[in-house]
Image (spheres, rainbow, N blue to C red):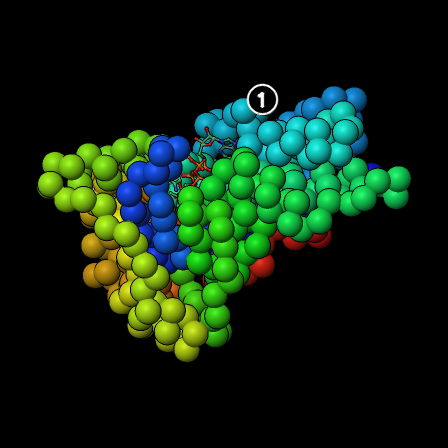
Amino acid sequence: MSAVRVRVPAKVNLQLGVGPIREDGYHDLVNVFHAVSLFDELTAEPADGLELAVEAAPYSRVAIGRVPTDARNLAARAAVLVASRLGVEPRVRLRIRKAIPVAGGMAGGSADAAAALVACARLWDDRERPALARDDLMEMGAELGSDVPFALLGGTAIGVGRGERLTPALTRGTFHWVFAAADGGLSTPAVYAECDRLRDAAGESAPRPSVAEDLMTALATGDAKALGAALANDLQPAALELRPSLARTLNAGRDLGAIGALVSGSGPTCAFLAETDEDAADLAVALDGAGVAEQIVRAQGPVPGATVL
Ligand SMILES: C[C@@](CO)(OP(=O)(O)O)[C@H](O)COP(=O)(O)OP(=O)(O)OC[C@H]1O[C@@H](n2ccc(N)nc2=O)[C@H](O)[C@@H]1O
Ligand SMILES: Nc1ncnc2c1ncn2[C@@H]1O[C@H](COP(=O)(O)OP(=O)(O)O)[C@@H](O)[C@H]1O
């Protein structure tokens, strides 16, 4: 096989319920993931060794300078994992074309890892040995990071445990989003640590999170207004503490007519929901004019997970 090209979506967390810290240092979550039409693209082709190149997608302002191009890159780690599982050498050139903000709370690194799992499994598929099944890829994804299995699955899904144990959620229709990407990222471990610190300082113990029924009903009925009202992120206070300027971004979106507004995951990207495609276009233009973000991007969800093109 000569080259495999995979398209993989970003995510926004519709509900991120953060529970107590587990013995392994991770937090117990209720994480309602939603895949949106903002895509990274990864191409895998045969090479003499493991090679990696990263470029920005046309018209995107992603900070590719902050993406590691060595063995720390999650896509490279995914390729090495697939090779070791199949008992082959990781002789592959990976080219990543990024549109998903870096360290933005939209799981761009996890997306690239999922794309590399799918691409390398296909590239090294050989009749001599049994092919890797979907479940094998999901299990390897969970080894690489909590958000990787969802990037394989896509759609809308409830994640529990670290966020890696997934159940697809019933949804109707399409939701229209506007994302405000910030200049500079936020570190996921730092945001979780700040969440713990804020809870400690307030004398609060972490609640055991549960799936919000109003959110699931809004998804199942395709009711955008109800979805907007049900959006919730327990990491938002921590992200706002670490990046106070995000309050201005969220307020601008609300004032300009968003029917829902929240920080995406650990941030700093802010997500705004609009009722129609036209409303999203108007909101995107108005937010761009307000100058509260590095880049404004429109997207729709749900969309499928990592897909071979
Ligand atoms: C917050 C979320 C929301 O979907 O994503 P982002 O917004 O960063 O994209 C995820 O929980 C991030 O998942 P992911 O980025 O895959 O994290 P991992 O590599 O598994 O873990 C990185 C670090 O995040 C913290 N972490 C992650 C998951 C979890 N359930 N509890 C945690 O405390 C830990 O400090 C861990 O060392
Ligand atoms: N393929 C990749 N794309 C982006 N970042 C990567 C990648 N591989 C490793 N990283 C590292 O992971 C960190 C988190 O990146 P990312 O997944 O984009 O953010 P988030 O966890 O906020 O969704 C980055 O700061 C970068 O150092």
Vertical order, 229 against 15 (above or below): below
Q: Residue furthest left?
A: 202
Q: Position of residue 31 (x, y in %)?
A: 39, 53
Taking the image as shown, residue 245 lies to the left or right of residue 151, namely: left
Q: Nearer the viewer, residue 224 or 181?
A: 224
| Count of picture labels | 1
User: Which residue is denoted by mark 1 in the rendering?
Assistant: 70
Work out whether residue 214 can be spotted.
Answer: yes
Q: Quadrant of the N terminus?
A: top right
Q: Position of residue 93 (x, y in %)?
A: 71, 29
Q: Position of residue 195 (x, y in %)?
A: 24, 39
Taking the image as shown, residue 204 lies to the left or right of residue 105, namely: left
Rendered residue at 66%/45% (across/down)? 136
Write down the quadrant of residue 184 in the picture.
top left
Work out whether residue 58 can be spotted.
Answer: no
Rendered residue at 37%/37% (across/down)? 26
* Mark 1 residue element: loop
Taking the image as shown, residue 275 lies to the left or right of residue 130, namely: left
Q: Nearer the viewer, residue 198 or 307?
A: 198
Q: Position of residue 118 (x, y in %)?
A: 67, 44
Q: Nearer the viewer, residue 259 or 79?
A: 79
Q: For the residue with label 1, is its CB less than 8 Å from the closest atom of ligand 2? A: no
Q: Residue furthest bottom?
A: 221
Q: Dot 1 surroundings within 10 Å: few (below 14), some, or many (20 or more)?
A: some
